[in-house]
Amino acid sequence: MIELAGLSKRYGDKVAVDRLTFAVRPGIVTGFLGPNGAGKSTTMRMILGLDHPSAGDVRIDGRHYAQLKDPLTYIGALLDAKAVHGGRSAYNHLLCLAQSNGIPKRRVAEVLDTVGLTTVARKKAKGFSLGMGQRLGIAAALLGDPRILMFDEPVNGLDPEGIHWIRNLMKSLAAQGRTVFVSSHLMSEMALTADHLVVIGQGRLLADTSMPDFIRQNSRSYVRIRSPQRERLLDTLHESGITVVEAGGGVLEVDGGKAEQIGELAARHGVVLHELSPQQASLEEAFMQLTAEAVEYHAHADPGLGPQDRSAGWKGRAR
């Protein structure tokens, strides 16, 4: 388990992390979300003792990272896949890590096989693609067979097969009772992978809840209805005290309604339905709703650029 208590980090006048308190528990995949500049990477660095907190505390299974003997056997992390000596082969990079943490040599070949790098094990890391570098970083995180794993943007550079693989890997690690903490900006992947969410904005905790509860609390759910007997359906719903919103194109929407209740009501009154579908916002929509006030960096389209100017970049404006 990873436990944060009032964790804060300042850089001069800038508050990067502001009194974070939460726990990352075993047996589930916990997603760590937030806009750019929210403090996610700084938080992860403090967990690993790479940055020192300005205030508060963070512990790994009850101890500070610096107190762990052979730390790779307790917690494995991928924070920066490029943090590899380019002149070393993948095998030798992992061997150095293994020897420094009392990990058996055989484990190097095992994790290289797990991440699919066996055939390039003796090649120098500087020749690796971004995706291969990610796989090597994941291998390093798995090397000590730790009970806690932490990944920052693990799918970066991976192809579709690799994304599918890492998603299933994280789920299987959690199913083994391990603690899995993963940060990503890819909401579609988080929706498929995470069971629990910790969301921060401008260094502060915004949410610490399950995935279904997060979406339900930060988005609109409704039932979409279409019927060739629209007026009769409207009368039936109104008589039953159900508030209806007309969405255009013959579509009716009932906020918070249950599709089963509406379907049974229509059947009792002989109303034909062409569509009766519950609608729930995506994780991305719920995330955008919650963090709207915490976004520091807003991009805007330049109204002075036409389609041709955009395709040509900024060359035409440098004169």
Image (cartoon, rainbow, N blue to C red):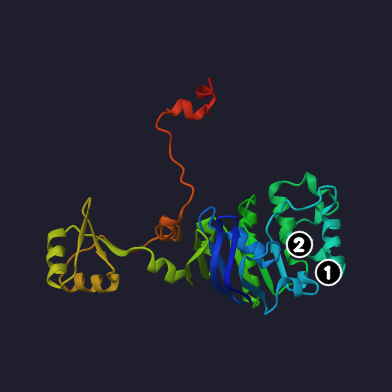
Position of residue 22 measured from the top left corner of the image (x, y, whole percent)? 55, 73
Which label belongs to residue 101?
1
Residue 272 in view, yes or no: yes
What residue sits 56% from the left and 62% below the top? 17
- Earlier-in-chain disc, 2 versus 1: 1
Q: Name the residue carrying label 2.
A: 140
Position of residue 265 measured from the top left corner of the image (x, y, whole percent)? 20, 73
Instruction: Measure how far apart labels 2 and 1 are at the Cα level.
Output: 12 Å
* Residue 175 in the figure: left or right of residue 236: right
Q: Nearer the viewer, mark 2 or mark 1?
A: 1
* Residue 125 in the figure: left or right of residue 135: right
- Work out which quarter of the rendered image holds the N terminus and state it: bottom right
Amino acid on which the number 1 mark rests in the picture: Asn
Residue at the bottom extreme? 62
Q: 235 and 154: which one is in front?
A: 154
Residue 193 in view, yes or no: no
Mark 1 Cα shell of 10 Å, populated few (<14), some (14-19), many (≥20)? some
Amino acid on which the number 2 mark rests in the picture: Ala
Position of residue 186 measured from the top left corner of the image (x, y, whole percent)? 53, 55
* Residue 129 in the figure: left or right of residue 272: right
